[in-house]
Amino acid sequence: DQELRNVIDKLAQFVARNGPEFEKMTMEKQKENPKFSFLFGGDFYGYYKYKLALEQQQLLCKQGQDIEAAPPIQPIPQPPLAPAAPIATPQGTPSMEELIQQSQWNLQQQEQHLLALRQEQITSAIAVGIEQQMQKVLEETQLDMNEFDNLLQPIIDTCTKDAISAGKNWMFSNAKSPQHCELMAEHLRNQITAEGAHFELRLHLIYLINDVLHHCQRKQQRDLLAALQKVVVPIYCTSFLAVEEDKQQKIARLLQLWEKNGYFDESIIQQLQSPALGLGQYQATLITEYANVVQPIQVAFQQQIQNLKTQHEEFVSSLTQQQQQQQPQPQPQPPPPPQIQIPPLESE
């Protein structure tokens, strides 16, 4: 559907430029419009997230190029050299210490901005890498993800036993290879960890995963179990950290069940028991896994930060040298008067 594709492409461009608030506004306005079901995890949700990540990466790369091409940022203009005279700071003129402090503050602000920009670019680059990998596997397996989404929607909406059973049966019927299993598990991860996903969507799909885990163990379906083990940390930790305590308890009950039934090894259980730490470790593994796209971003931003630090150091050195030149030189002391030796009087 070329018309729907144009809608998705345009919205991805606008959200990349205007931020997540624009996406939230669109979701609020179009929540009854079936054409925008992709915003709520429906058909073409994966394509929308892929286009959004691609647009964000292109936009951030352009911003990074603009920063690189811009003239060096001077922390503070250097004051003109004053004649060698008593160093009395005129009223309203900042002292050298104040100039250095202001330059240090500017450096910190610029560094924080660059670090935030770097993180955004890394996140976008990884998202694009994940989506490209999933598209490759999708072409190899020819798995019908639209059919999967059509079975997931009733689970999200009602979470009845029949809906969960239909979703579980479809997953087992299509668990034909490790690649098939990983694609299904990663699709669930993307749905659950999406920024705009609501609590019921996350909880209901985790109930599906719980049922699938039970049958994986009972039927010895190792490939599907292994695929879910790879994605359970971001799924559980993201869902847990996004809600208040009473809702966290609903998710935590599932963790107790998983631990009791031995679905996961001890290292995974430990990450699930400390969601913030577990999510951080997962993100670190993504950085390692996609090092080929992450490292160039890290190197480029590190060079920009180092350039700013060098400018600050040169500015401080210039101020220090200027102050030394302004110090009054000690006046040479006149030589002491010659000592006159008076000969002693001779006695007669």
Image (cartoon, helix red, strand yellow):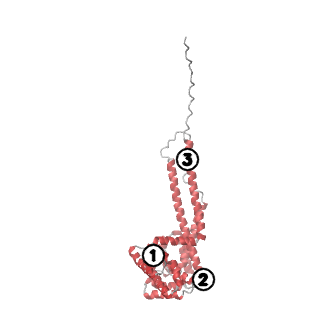
Outermost residue, top side: 348
How many marks are shown on the rendered structure?
A: 3
Residue corresponding to mark 2: 139
Determine the residue positioned at 56% across, 32% down.
333
Which badge, 2 or 1, is on the more N-terminal residue? 2
Residue corresponding to mark 1: 239
Q: Amino acid under label 1?
A: Ser
Q: Amino acid under label 2?
A: Glu
| Image quarter of the N terminus | bottom right
**Crowding at label 3, few (<14), some or many (≥20) Cα neighbours within 10 Å?**
some
Specify the label residue 111 is tagged with: none
Which badge, 3 or 2, is on the more N-terminal residue? 2
Cα distance between the residues tagged 3 and 1: 54 Å
Residue corresponding to mark 3: 320
Disc 2 + disc 1, Cβ < 8 Å: no
Which badge, 3 or 1, is on the more N-terminal residue? 1
| Image quarter of the C terminus | top right
- Where residue 266 sits: x, y (%)? 48, 76
The relative height of residue 67 versus residue 275 in the rendered view (above or below) is above
- Where residue 49 sits: x, y (%)? 53, 76
The relative height of residue 307 versus residue 148 in the rendered view (above or below) is above
- Where residue 128 sits: x, y (%)? 57, 74
Element type where label 2 sits in the image = helix
Residue 125 appearing in the image: no
